[in-house]
Amino acid sequence: MRIEKCSFCGAPVYPGHGIMYVRNDAKMFRFCASKCNKAFKRKKNPLKTKWTKAFRKAAGKELSLDRTLAFEKRRNVPVKYNRELMAKTLRAMKRVNEIKERRVKAHYAKRMEVRVALESAADLKLLQTNMDWVPEGQRERVERNVKAGNAWLKKKRSESANEKAMNRRASQSK
């Protein structure tokens, strides 16, 4: 049983499901739903369509350049059954899945760091502009925390700027 990928959104298309479109040049396209089929025929760009896998990977919302994602091998001739090979393959698959899950979690945590920094910046700005909301007894402590928060945000911004510059240099050298 071969599970294909949707030609538009990248979702899995199981046997007996979806729509197959064959162009005049004999190129086959598989779609998971009529939504994808219609979008493809309207010449929509999957990179600009927010719900597709292509958009999510291009926007950095999903892990894209990971070696664990490239382990699947497509074979047209079935491999002869070998008990030892199967056991070894299953162990390897389990290990690859563990590594993949760990990397996905790390990617998610890194993405959420940016969000936490943005929320913190918004909270600090709100506090600075509306310091009169804070009770008199707590005002001094809150002002100290706001100053510390501003220093933390500056540090985070400089770290992210350095990281972006390093990534830019690395991509240019390739």
Image (tube, grey):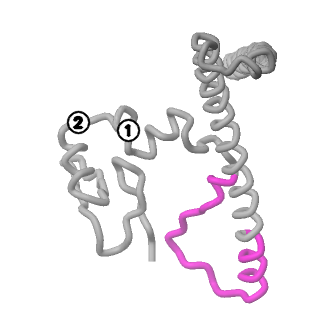
First along the sequence among labels 1 and 2:
2
Q: Which of the 4 image quadrants contains residue 138?
A: top right
* Residue underneath mark 2: 43
Q: Position of residue 102 (x, y in %)?
A: 74, 54
For the record, the magenta segment spans 68-92
- Amino acid, disc 2: Lys
Magenta span has 81? yes
The answer to whether 4 appears left or right of 164 in the picture is left
Residue placed at 37% from the left, 49% from the top? Answer: 9
- Image quadrant where one finds the C terminus: top right
Q: Position of residue 78 (x, y in %)?
A: 55, 78
Image position of 44 with respect to 139: above or below = below
Towards the viewer: 1 or 76: 1
Image position of 60 with respect to 4: above or below = above
Residue placed at 66% from the left, 50% from the top? Answer: 104
Q: Neighbour class for label 1 at 10 Å: few (<14), some, many (≥20)?
A: few
* Residue underneath mark 1: 50
Q: Between tags 1 and 2, which lies in front?
A: 1
- Amino acid, disc 1: Lys
